[in-house]
Amino acid sequence: MGALRELLEVDDLEVEFILEGHPRPVVSEVSFALRKARTLCLVGESGCGKSVTALSILGLLPDPPGRITGGHVWFDGRDLTALTQNELSRIRGRRISMVFQEPMTSLNPVFTVGDQVAEVYRTHLGLGRQESLEKAVEMLRRVGIPDPAQRAGNYPHQMSGGMRQRVLIAIALACHPEVLLADEPTTALDVTIQAQILALMKELRDEMGTAVLLITHDFGVVAEAADEVAVMYAGRIVEQADCDTLFHSPWHPYTTGLLRSRPRPGDGAGGKGRRLEAIPGTVPSPANLPRGCSFEPRCSRREDICRESAPPLEQKNGGQLARCWIPPAKEA
Amino acid sequence: MREPLLQVQGLKKYFPVKGGLLQRRRDRVHAVEGVDFEIRSGQTLSLVGETGCGKSTTGKLVVRLLEPTEGTIRFRGIDLLTLSPREMRNLRREMQIIFQDPFSSLNPRLTIRQTVGEPLVLHEKGSRRERDDKVVHLLRKVGLKPEDRFRYPHEFSGGQRQRVGIARALALNPRLIVADEPVSSLDVSIQAQVTNLLLDLQEELGLSYLFISHDLGLVEHISDEVAVMYLGRIIERGPARSLFANPRHPYTEALLDSIPVRDPRQRKGGHRPLSGDVPSPIHPPGGCPFHPRCPLREEICTQTFPGLFEFSPGHIVHCHVRGKRG
């Protein structure tokens, strides 16, 4: 894993939001690296800071209310957090690009999809009209749109959600970016279409050697797509490991809780009456974070120390990084 | 065997598609195209399928929030479609619906006491005091605190709002609850809490659920019976265990195959389970609606909708090819 080149490194990122007049930390001490042809999944529940992290990388954070207050994003020897919007716009879409959750609203309704893909070539590579349109059709073919020459003339509303998400992926990958940030790219899609899109993203990643940051709340997507996983809770990474380690020997009680709260096959019907293992309570608000470990109020493993001081993210004996004072008990 | 609580037969719903200068009806969306099922007391039937398959429309038809185009709905043996509005209103106390979005299904200007108590005001006489006691009782039942009744929806998280929605649905002691994606918009850790609450309430109150969901993992966990819908039709139905262990319809197989793996060690290595998109319900394909995407397609599939074949007791499928070979 360490042998693979790091294309992008997030180093100790801190982001604050002004909430009801007060600056509140929404991302703290977040560090990770994206590597060539590998997928890192950033997983967590709403409000954990995973999307804010991705937006910060590209300088897309709405300011106000958001502001990067610390840390660096290293890409090609430069710190992206120190660049001007103008400098960033030369990197965005060309060397680092992004796919969002909502394929219905991310496309411009008054231009054909062919035009919207072609625009990338015109803007970033300075190609002419005819040539950029030809390349756009080729890119639409690459993302599996049938009859691409004809579909290029369609407007977004004439396409299904799955087809639109393919168009967004075509736009994102048109310039063969080194890094792709995908924020819940399959959440709005049906399972059969989700399977198609995940397979497509993997195929193109392998072909182009793209480093992928995949943001999701769904451990099924993680199990399908991740090489490495970082679990976020209340703005911090609480556990980070390779995918197999995370699923088979999770260290942090939050990771364990999320994995256990999923229904298990074979539990159903005949096993009805069996309850899911829920995590009690709710995520704390950034305005009201506990003094010690932010998961402490919901934690089944908590002890006195957890209330008093926040644990650091440190290497544990299974090879994972975790932010927890108390080792998991040997459970049956 | 006792009579089912709910019996639905030949249910159809078409929506007009209007267009042109005078907004004349130009076409019809075939949202529900002849659906049959039953739910017994204390049992859960889940309707599953992709966006636009007609599962939510079916749920709304059952409680008559929409008027069916054709078909019959019997609740406790009573044919709902012959009832007067007044009779229907009385019977509706026994059938309630919970919606997906806990953010838009509560009135932001009403306190929780008003929201949960509203059905009591509408349907039951009772004094103010009695209603208040009942609201407290309902909030306790769904895991909220009595003092929460003085608060407004925006003060609650998504999971808590969904609990409020459930408390409101329970106010009139219903026997059937139509739950339309009740946990889909909630966070993973909260989904498990609300799912457990629904299971607890079912056990305690003997409720029947018509559970509408696209989350097959969850459906397997909570259902007695499962019906798979595609383009307005049920193409396979059976006891949950049998259907998940032995899916017979090629669409059900593809759907189950698309569920993400639970464990990275089970990855299937890049195969694509099902190609193409669901066709438009305005002009659904003739014959079996799945035939354009079906790997088993034969000549006959393009011509007639397949009849019902029963594989094991209660496990039925509509498929020419699988029906023939058994």
Image (cartoon, rainbow, N blue to C red):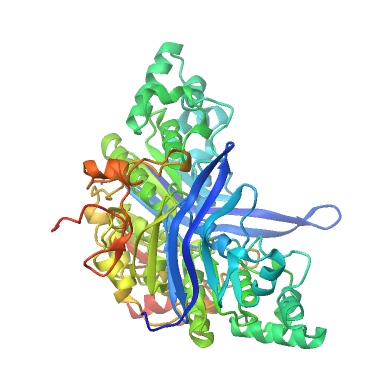
**Foreground pick, B93 / A34:** A34
User: Is B156 located above or below residue A255 in the figure?
Assistant: above
Residue at screen point 13% across, 58% down: A330
Q: Work out whether residue B52 or residue A186 is closer to the camera in this orientation and state it.
A: A186
Q: Residue A263, relative to residue B115: is it above or below?
A: below
Can you say whether B147 is above or below A252 in the image?
Answer: above
Measured from the top left, where is residue A272 in percent x and y? 25, 51
Image point (42%, 75%), residue name = B250
- The answer to whether one can see residue B313 in this image is no
Residue B166 position within the rendered picture, expressed as x and y whole percent measured from the top left:
42, 36
Q: Quadrant of residue A217?
A: bottom left
Q: Quadrant of the C terminus of chain B?
A: bottom left
Most foreground residue, A123 or A140: A123
**Numbered marks: total:** 0
The front one of A257 and B23 is A257
In this rendering, is residue A128 above or below A10?
below
In the rendered image, residue A70, in percent from the top left (x then y), is placed at 52, 56
Q: Which residue is pictured at 72% across the width and 79% down the height?
A: A124
Position of B243 compared to B214: left or right? left
On the question of residue A325 being in view, the answer is: yes
Horizontally, is B161 left or right of A167 in the view?
Answer: left
Q: Residue at x 55, y 27 (%)?
A: B86
Query: In the visual, does B124 lie left or right of A129?
Result: left
Q: Quadrant of residue B27?
A: bottom right
Give the image location of residue A89, x and y in percent. Answer: 69, 69
